[in-house]
Image (cartoon, helix red, strand yellow):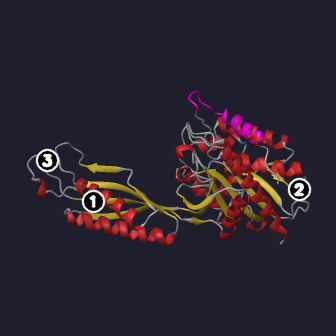
Amino acid sequence: MLTINSSRLLANLEELGQIGAAAAGGVSRPALSQADVAGRDWFKRRVLAAGLQFRADGAGNLSALLPAQHSEAKTVLAGSHLDTVPNGGRFDGALGVLCALEALQTIKEAGVKLPCHLEAISFTDEEGAVVSMLGSRALTGQLTPADLRDVRQPGALDAGLRRLKLTRADVLAAGRNPATLAGFVELHIEQGRRLESQQLDLGVVTAIVGIRSFWLHFTGQAGHAGTTPLAARADALRGAAAFVLAAQQLVQERHSPGVMNCGQIQVEPGSFNIIPARVRLALEFRHGTEAELEAMQADLLALAGTVAGQHGLEFSSEVVDACRAAAMDAALIGLVERTAAELGLTSTRLLSFAGHDSQTMSAITPTALFFVPSVNGISHNPAEFTHPKDVVNGANVLLHTLLQLAGRCSD
């Protein structure tokens, strides 16, 4: 059975990890930074050294291409991203790109001829240093001029694009025709402990969760914190705190494995000796289907209203943002599972509670996402680590998934 070159793959991971490396062991390659440019240059050299074709599109997405015999054939893509969060780890994103590159190089060296093009791709700015998932959103036609105006670091986008010799117009013109694509597969570290705790080799993602966020407003009455009896207070902070505790219990009991979080709070008047009159509380919740998100929203907002009433408060809410859940392709889920079993590996199905480029790609082509274990579930941290055997297992599953998926192009 064909297998990847494990020593070469692990050496590539180690070498890339030195670009943007910090003394404490972390890696900083934020998208469009000088370190990111260095990582991009390194990737291009590796692609050409592998005897593959190199391509960069208007959004700065980088690709290694293994062409089919017929130019009009469809393309199977695999990959992830090379950018990191500040002082992140060596595996998040990079693992998926380098395993895809290794799979293509292995197939080329074996002389396997396939009826479709294979493409290992690195998407620009998955981590959102400037524009979250800029590359995959541009490729899928989901990026708008307004998105490029609403950037996280004013001036950083244009400065970064200049480093890549690109313009905003180039980015917006980087869309691909979905009819030319046969599918997309992404390999990633889990960013959690589910696989490690169950001693499983692989996690096959059924869906990437949708996210909804709200500002919740609890309004009571200010008063003297020393002279007003506790039982007589309309304390907005006490009501908000009661909601947070009750909401966590509600989600655990009714909406598992969904999650919720209250990560920001603003209290007015904000004084040691004044009873809080107004609280603005950030609420975010996540689940794998729109139906579950609707149910969570209804339950959580109803709970907030009930708790407010119990504490003599008024309640209102406002929508902040919403990101739709993205289901992965059922046929590709099965293909990854069968491939893992044929290689003697164990797997389970699970949700991804973090965003990935697969979420964007699933809008235009059949998409699969699968995880390998990360030690202690650590991610976005210098201590991030995946054992070499898990790296190699994931790469071989990706290799044979691509072979089978590409073989179907002639069906």
First of labels 3, 1 by sequence position = 1
State the SS at label 2: loop
Res. 218 image quadrant: bottom left
Q: Is residue 241 left or right of residue 121?
A: left
Question: Residue 136 versus residue 21: which sits nearer the camera?
Answer: 21
In this figure, which residue is indicated by the disc labeled 2? 112
Identify the residue at image location x=29%, y=67%.
305
Tell me the residue that label 1 is attached to.
Answer: 218
- Locate residue 265, reporting x and y percent: 33, 50
Alpha-carbon neighbours of circle 1 within 10 Å: few (<14), some, or many (≥20)? many
Q: Position of residue 349 (x, y in %)?
A: 59, 62
Residue carrying label 3: 225
Q: Quadrant of residue 359?
A: bottom right
- The residue at the point 83 percent across, 72 percent down is 411
Q: Which residues are magenta?
A: 7-25
**Residues at marks 3 and 1 touching, judged by CB atoms closer than 8 Å:** no
